[in-house]
Image: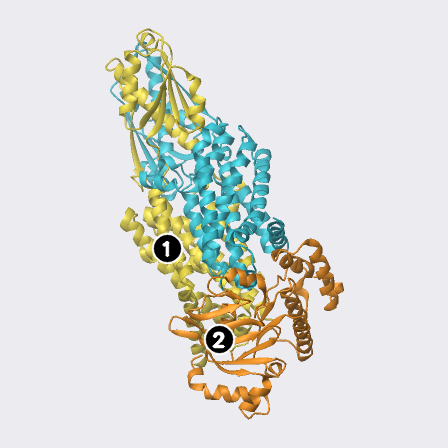
Amino acid sequence: MTGVAIVAKGLTRRFGGFTAVDAVTFDVRAGEVFGFLGANGAGKTTAIRILTGLLAPSSGAASVAGFDVYREREAIKRSIGYMSQRFSLYNDLTVRENIRLYGTIYGLSASVIRARTDNLLERLRLGESGSKRVGTLPLGWKQKLAFSVALLHQPRIVFLDEPTGGVDPVTRRQFWELIYGAAGQGTTVFVTTHYMDEAEYCDRLGIMVAGRLDALGTPHELKERFGAGSMDEVFLRLARSGAPAGAAA
Amino acid sequence: MKRSSAFLGLLQKEARHILRDRRTLAVIVLMPIIQVVLFGYAIRTDVEDIRLAIVDPEPDAATHALRTRLGASGLFRIVAVERSTDGLNALFASGAAQQAVVFERGFGDRLESARAARIQIITDAAEPNTGTAMQNYADALIRDHEGELREGTGPPPIAADVRMRFNPTRESSNLFVPGLIAFVITIISALMTAISLAREKETGTMEVLLVSPLRPVEIIAGKVAPYLLVGLATVVLVIIEARLIFGVPLRGSAVLLLAEGVLFTVTSLSLGILISARTPSQRVAMTAVLAGTMLPTVMLSGFIFPLESLPTPLRLISAVIPARWFVEIARGIMLKGVGLDHLWQESLVLVGMTGVLLMASMRSFRVRLD
Amino acid sequence: MRRLLYLSWVEVLHVVRDRASLAQLLLVPFIQLVILANAATFAIHDTPAAIVDLDATAASRALSQRFAASPHFRIIGGPRSVAGADEALRSGEATMVLAIPRGFERALVRGEGARVQVQLNAEKGSAAGIVQSYAQRIIARFGAERGEREGTAPALRRIDVQTRGWYNTELDYRQYMVPGILVALVTLVGTLFTAQNIAREKELGTLEQLNVTPISRAEFIAAKLLPFWVLGMAELTLGLGLGAAVFGMPVRGSLLLLLGVAAVYLVAALGIGLLISTAVDTQQQAMFVTFFIMMIYLLMSGLYTPVDSMPGWVRMAAEANPVKHFVEVTRAVLIKGAGAAEIAKPVGMLGAFAAGFFGLAVWRYRKTA
C-alpha cells in the first residue's frame, strides 16, 4: 500500500432499475481526512456499504486497504473501523461492556482491551460513566463513544457515515477534534456528511449528486473552481445543475 | 367532511401496512387454511392399526384360531410372536408394540374344560384414552370370538343400538372448525391490533396521530377496521374450505354465525387495544397477548381439550374467557343447527363481555392522551 | 473461544436486562405449565347421561343402577320421555341418552334378545367413541352376568379376559402430558427467542455494525445459539424437577440420558429459530413465521394426538419433525423407562436435524447489509 488507502474505478451499484452509485471514480490517500458530501439519497451510504464489504458492487472496481471489494471482503473487514448512520452500540449494555464486546470480536487480548478502555474513557472524560448503560448517555456522548469503539482495534481506515447527525454544534466541534486526533495518528478517515461547515474541515472532498461523483478536490480547489465563497455555495450550484437527475432521488 | 377524509386516509394507510408486509399477511391467511387441513387430516384420535405382540407359550389349535382372528380383524398388526413375556418390556419401551395378548399354558385344553381359559391383555396405557380404546377393542374381539365358540348354547346378548347424533361419522374436523374460527379471530384481531398499535407507539407515529384533528375513537376505528375485515374474510375462507374438503356442515343460520363472529371480533379487538395501551413495546405486547388471549383461547375454550375434563378451578376461569362462549355458540350454529332461542344466554354473556372490554379499552386509550 | 463466550455472555445480558424477555422466558412458560398440566386432558369421567326407562321393571332398574354406579357416568334427573331426552341432548345437558324400551325385562327372561338404545352427542368425535365403549361394556357385562345367574349359560368354552394397562395405571392424563408439555414449552420459548434475536438486531441497526467486523459466520450463529441452549437446558431441568415434584410426573428412566438427548435436540430447535431469523426483516415477522412453523410442528408431534392415528402420508411427514422425535424420546424415557438402545433411532434422527439446521442457519446468514 503505497500511500493509497482506497481506490474506486467506475464503481456502480444498481437496485433493480435504479442506479444508486453510478460509475464513481476516486482515490483516498493514506492518512487523509476524506469527506463524502451529498444530499440525502445521493448514494453516499450505498457507496460506503460497498467499500466496507457490506454490499457487492454491480460493476466497476475498488480496493480498500489493498483488498478487493469483490473477493476479499472479510480481509477488508479486518482492516477497517465503521460507524454507521444509526447508533449501533447496545443501549442495554454498559459502556465498558460495549467496548469489551467489540474488543473481543476484533481479537484483542483481555489486557489490551482493559488498557485501551481506561485510556478511551479518560480521553472522552467518561471515567465515571464506565458502568452506566449506554442508553442513558446523551446523544453526543453516544456518538463520541461509537467513534472511539470503531477505532478500538486501531484500524488503518475508519468509515464514518454521517457521524454528527442530530448533534449540537459544540459536540460536533469536539467530535471533529477526535477525528483530527485519529488522522494525526495515521488513520485514514472516510466521512460522509451533509453539513457544509464540516466539509471545510476535510483534506479533500468528493461531492455526490444523484449517484454520480460530480466534483473532487480540496475545499480550496472546489471553491475556486466554482467561484464560490463557501462550500455551501459550491454545493448549491452542483445540486442545481444536477436537479433534473437529482429529482428522482 | 374534512374529518371523514382524514379518517379514510387513516384507513387507507392501515390497509397499506397490512398489504405491504407480504410475509405477515401470508402467514395470517395461510395459517388458518393449513390448520383446517391439519386438524382435519392429521389430528385424529381414532385408534387403528394397533401394533400387537402375541405371547403364546403352548401354541395349539385354539390359540391359532384366535390369533388368526386378531390378525384378520384389520384393527391389529401382529408385530411379534413370543413364547414368554420376557421380551415385552423392550417391545413396549421402544414403541415397537402397543399391546400384547398373552395366552396361558394349556389354553386349548382349559377351553374345553369346565374352567375358564385365561387370556391377559396388556396395553400401553401411557395415553389413557388410546389405552382404553385399545383395551376395549381387543376385549370386544375376544368376547365375539367366545360368543361364536358358544354359538347357540345360551341367550343372545343384549343388543345396544348406538346412534351418534350431530356428527354421525365422528369427524374430528367438525369439532375443531368452530374452535379454529375463534382462534383465527383472536390471532388477527387481538394480536395484530396490539402489535400494530404498540409499533406506532414505539416509533412515535402515534403522537402524530393524536395531535391530528381525529378523535381517539376515530383513530382506533381507523386502525382496527382493516383487521376486522381481514379477520372476517379469513373466517369465511375457513368455513368454505372446511365444507369443501371435509364436509363440515353449517346447519344453522350463516347470518347469525357471521353476526356472532363480528361480535367476537370486536371483543378481541378491544382486548388488543387494552393490551397495547398498557404495554410499552411490541415485545411486551406480544408476550401479553400470548399469555392473555392466545393461550386461554387454545387451552380453556374447549377448542382442543373438552371443557368437561377441566378441573373445577380452571372451569371457573374458562367462564370469563370470551372464546369459550363463542366456541359454544359456533358449535351450536354449525353442528346442531340451533338458533338464538338456544344460544341467547351465551350470546348475552358475550355481548356483556364485549361491552365491558370496549369501554375499558376506550378509557385506557383516552387516559394515554392526558 | 473467548470471543464466542463473551458474545454469548452479552446475549445473556440482553435477556436479563429486558423485562419483556424475562417474562417470556420465566413467566409465560410457568403459567403455561400450570394451566396446561391441568387443562391438557382428554379424560372422560362423569359423562352426563339421561336414562329414559320406558320399561320400569326390576331388570331395567338394575341396568340403570349399573350406569349410576359407574364412575364414567353421572345420571342427570329429569327427562322421562323420549322428547325430553332429545332436548337434553340438544341443549348439551346430557352427552348420552340410554333408552330402555318397553318389554325389555320380558325379552330378557324369554331369552329373545333384549334391546336398548344408546344415543350420543358425537360432536366430540373420539370422546364419543370412548363413552360408547364404556356404555357397551356395562350393558354386555350386565347381560352376561344375568345369563349366568339365571343358569341358562353353560360353563364350557369360557374365556376369562384380564386387562392390564401398563405405565399409567391410574389413567391420569397429567402423567402422560407433562413430559410432552415440557418439550413444547422449551421448544416454543427457545425458538421464539432465537427467531426474534437476529431480527431485533436488524431493527436496531446493531447487526450492520457486527457485519463489518471480521467475526466468522459460524462463530456468530454459535454465539447466538449457545446462551439460549444453556437457558433451554436450565429451563428443561427446572421443568423436569417441577413436573416430578408438583405434578407427579413419573421418572422411570435415566434423567441423564434424557438431558443428553435434549442437548442434541435443542441445537436443532434453536437452529430452526435462527434460520427463521436470518430470513425475516422484523421481529413481528419472526414471531408470526415462528408461530406458523411451530404450530405445524407441535400439532404433528404426537403431543396432543397420537401420531399412530394419523393417515400414512402425515406419518411420513412427521418423520421430518424434530419435535415428534423428541416428544417420543421424552415419553419413552420418563414414562416407559426406555434405555439408550430403545431410543437409538429417534436420537440418530435428532443428531441429523441438529447438524442440518445449524448448518443451514450458518449458510443462510449473510454478512451483508
Can residue C194 be seen in this snapshot? yes
Task: Please tell me which residue is depicted at 58% across the width and 76% down the height of the picture.
Answer: A34
Residue denoted by label 1: B30
Q: Position of residue B366 (x, y in %)?
A: 56, 68
Q: Position of residue B137 (x, y in %)?
A: 34, 26
A91 versus B179 height, above or below:
below
Which quadrant: the C terminus of chain B?
A: bottom right
Marks 1 and 2 belong to one chain: no
Q: Foreground mark, 1 or 2?
A: 2
Helix, strand or loop at mark 1: helix
Task: Please tell me which residue is depicted at 45% across the width and 27% down the height of the picture.
Answer: B93
**Residue type at the position of mark 1:** Leu
Check the rendered structure and report the hue given to chain C.
Answer: cyan
Residue denoted by label 2: A43
In the image, the chain rendered in orange is A
Helix, strand or loop at mark 2: loop
Can residue B126 be seen in this snapshot? no
Decide: few, some or many residues near mark 1? Use Cα within 10 Å; few <14, some 14-19, many ≥20.
Answer: few
In the image, the chain rendered in yellow is B
Please identify the quarter of the rendering in which residue B1 is found.
bottom left
CA distance separating discs 1 and 2:
38 Å
**Residue type at the position of mark 2:** Gly
Q: Is residue A185 left or right of residue B250?
A: right
Label disc, if present, on residue C277 of the rendered structure: none
Task: Please tell me which residue is depicted at 42% across the width and 17% down the height of the picture.
Answer: B85
Q: Is residue A183 left or right of residue C202?
A: right
Decide: few, some or many residues near mark 2? Use Cα within 10 Å; few <14, some 14-19, many ≥20.
Answer: many
The residue nearer to you, when weighing A182 against B239, is A182
B122 versus C246 height, above or below:
above
